[in-house]
Image (tube, rainbow, N blue to C red):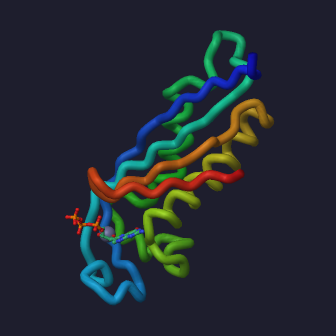
């Protein structure tokens, strides 16, 4: 039998405007999305009450990372004043920032496994590290 892995995820939704620099098409013009960010985290060992981490605590962590974007122009919010605002790069940002906070809180017991970012119902980018 393989070693056990538990995984949970939490969604965070924000509404914001952006434009994709150098796109060369319509997405270079300012437009908006209701972005959905799904952060998946995993652990081999559950906490003392049988959770990877409480959904509510994960929600707080992800909201700390993503709250800065809500009802803003993403291109004006660092680091996206210098980094392009693609779903791929937003996914990487949520991954790195959530991973840092989880490490501080859980000392390595819980790690981010992947981050999914939807720009709309049919357009998804995934970031993970191998
Ligand atoms: N690989 C990526 N491609 C595109 C990105 C991206 O982040 N990564 N982003 C965009 C634009 O932000 C655009 O607003 C979204 O594109 P799209 O999903 O094509 O949106 P539409 O509303 O035009 O989609 P339809 O399903 O065709 O209506 C572009 N590409
Ligand atoms: Zn867009």
**Residue positioned most to the front:** 1
**Residue positioned most to the top:** 49
Question: Which residue is depicted at the point 50% across and 34% down?
Answer: 9
Question: Which residue is depicted at the point 49% across and 64% down?
Answer: 88
Quarter residue 53 falls in = top right
Task: State whether residue 83 is above or below residue 109.
Answer: below
Relative side of 51 to 31, left or right: right
Task: State whether residue 47 is above or below residue 89.
Answer: above
Question: Which residue is depicted at the point 43% across and 53% down?
Answer: 117
Number of marks in the rendered image: 0
Q: Quadrant of the N terminus?
A: top right
Relative side of 32 to 43, left or right: left
Task: State whether residue 130 is above or below residue 72.
Answer: above
In-front residue for pair 21/23: 23
Indicate the position of residue 48 as horizontal and vertical percent values. 71, 12
Relative side of 66 to 101, left or right: left
Task: State whether residue 84 is above or below residue 112.
Answer: below
In-front residue for pair 112/53: 112
Indicate the position of residue 30 as horizontal and vertical percent values. 27, 79
Question: Which residue is depicted at the point 47% across and 70% down?
Answer: 77
Indicate the position of residue 22 as horizontal and vertical percent values. 41, 88
Q: Quadrant of ligand 2?
A: bottom left
Quarter residue 28 falls in = bottom left
Indicate the position of residue 45 as horizontal and vertical percent values. 74, 20
């Amino acid at each position: 039998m393989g070693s056990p892995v538990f995984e949970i995820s939490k969604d965070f939704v924000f509404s914001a405007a952006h434009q994709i620099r150098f796109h060369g098409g319509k997405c270079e013009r300012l437009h908006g999305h209701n972005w959905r960010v799904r952060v998946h985290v995993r652990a081999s060992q559950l906490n003392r009450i049988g959770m990877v981490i409480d959904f509510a605590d994960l929600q707080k962590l992800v909201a700390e990372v993503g709250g800065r974007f809500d009802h803003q122009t993403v291109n004006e919010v660092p680091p996206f004043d210098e980094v392009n605002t693609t779903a791929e790069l937003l996914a990487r940002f949520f991954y790195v920032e959530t991973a840092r906070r989880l490490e501080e809180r859980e000392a390595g017991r819980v790690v981010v496994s992947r981050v999914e970012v939807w720009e709309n119902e049919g357009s998804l980018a995934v970031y993970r590290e191998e």
